[in-house]
């Protein structure tokens, strides 16, 4: 069972980030009140990082026990540890360090200098996320690219969008760097909540394709759904 999409429209990218951050904090407190450790998949990108920064600077963030939240990523660039282009590094200062999240709760993708091949890294991260897969991800954040991609799953790439393993190695990415790691559509669609981040005029076509429910070969963002909730955080610019 999948949920119908809800669309949250804000006046600007910054306002969309705040709206997503407020809802994120609320969900985390609800999950913890139910006696569970929230399992969360983060994303990079301009809006994805702004959501994390808005969360990190929110007074309401103190309502969350951040030592009892498990954090993962939907994809990662195959770069060395600490590289400025890695999604986990971009989340570090304004979110991970701002909220003093314990390192044992931060489940990063392997890096290119960890001594693994790209394929070995995919297998390693599959093992890392296995406990969360059993519990079910509570929130999966996904930025939507202008071409309709999510994570590192690009259109016109059936080798990526048709993959069934939970984590895959991505080669020849149309976006640099060419090598990446990514969660896959079947795994994403097991999440309780899938939240799409889609703002700005360059993403109007992608936004329209999502609403038109096109296939993954045209816009992977159109086929990801949460089992309980699917939300698009948009702004007035993307509406056209």
Image: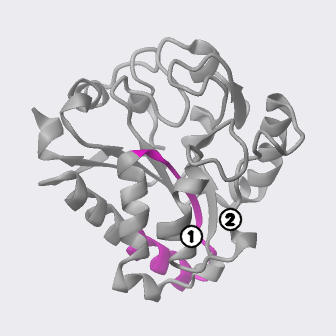
Q: Is residue 171 left or right of residue 142?
A: right
Front residue of this view, candidates 149 and 30: 149
* Quarter assignment of residue 170: top right
User: Relative to 57, does residue 9 appear above or below in the rendering?
Assistant: above
Q: Position of residue 28 (x, y in %)?
A: 48, 74
* Residue found farthest to the right: 115
Q: Quadrant of the C terminus?
A: top left
Q: Which is in the foreground here, disc 2 or disc 1? A: 1
Q: Position of residue 220 (x, y in %)?
A: 45, 26
Residue at image x 79%, y 31%? 118
Residue at image x 43%, y 81%? 61
Q: From where the camera sits, is residue 210 visible?
A: yes
Residue at image x 71%, y 37%? 166
Q: Are marks 2 and 1 in contact (CB under 8 Å)?
A: yes
Q: Secondary structure at mark 2?
A: loop
Q: Secondary structure at mark 1?
A: helix
Q: What segment carries the magenta color?
A: 24-45
- The residue at which mark 1 appears reads as 96
Distance Cα–Cα, label 2 vs label 1: 8 Å
User: Relative to 148, does residue 183 appear above or below in the rendering?
Assistant: below
Marks counted in the figure total 2
Instruction: Inspect the magenta stretch and tell me whether residue 43 lies in it.
Output: yes
Q: Is residue 226 left or right of residue 34?
A: left
Q: How is the image coloured?
A: one colour
Q: Earlier in the sequence, mark 2 or mark 1?
A: 1
* Quarter assignment of residue 22: bottom left
- The residue at which mark 2 appears reads as 106
Q: Position of residue 102 (x, y in %)?
A: 68, 77
Instruction: Inspect the magenta stretch and tell me whether residue 164 lies in it.
Output: no
Q: Crowding near pointer 1: few (<14 within 10 Å), some, many (20+)?
A: many
Q: Position of residue 56 (x, y in %)?
A: 43, 74
């Amino acid at each position: 069972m999948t949920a119908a999409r809800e669309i949250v429209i804000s006046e600007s990218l910054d306002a969309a980030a705040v709206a997503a951050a407020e809802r994120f904090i609320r969900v985390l407190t609800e999950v913890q009140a139910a006696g569970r450790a929230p399992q969360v998949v983060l994303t990079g990108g301009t809006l994805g990082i702004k959501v994390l920064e808005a969360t990190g600077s929110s007074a309401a963030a103190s309502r969350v026990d951040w030592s009892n939240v498990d954090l993962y990523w939907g994809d990662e660039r195959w770069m060395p540890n600490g590289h400025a282009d890695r999604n986990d590094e971009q989340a570090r200062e304004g979110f991970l360090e701002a909220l003093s999240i314990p390192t044992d709760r931060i489940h990063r993708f392997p890096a290119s200098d960890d001594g693994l091949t790209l394929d070995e890294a995919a297998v390693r991260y599959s093992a890392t996320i296995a406990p969360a897969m059993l519990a079910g991800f509570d929130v999966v954040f996904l930025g939507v690219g202008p071409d309709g991609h999510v994570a590192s799953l690009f259109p016109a790439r059936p080798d990526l969008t048709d993959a069934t393993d939970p984590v895959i190695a991505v080669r020849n990415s149309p976006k640099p760097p060419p090598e990446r790691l990514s969660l896959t559509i079947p795994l994403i669609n097991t999440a309780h909540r899938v939240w799409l981040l889609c703002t700005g005029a360059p993403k109007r076509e992608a936004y329209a394709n999502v609403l038109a429910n096109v296939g993954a070969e045209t816009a992977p963002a159109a086929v990801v759904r949460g089992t309980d909730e699917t939300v698009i955080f948009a702004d007035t610019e993307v509406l056209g």
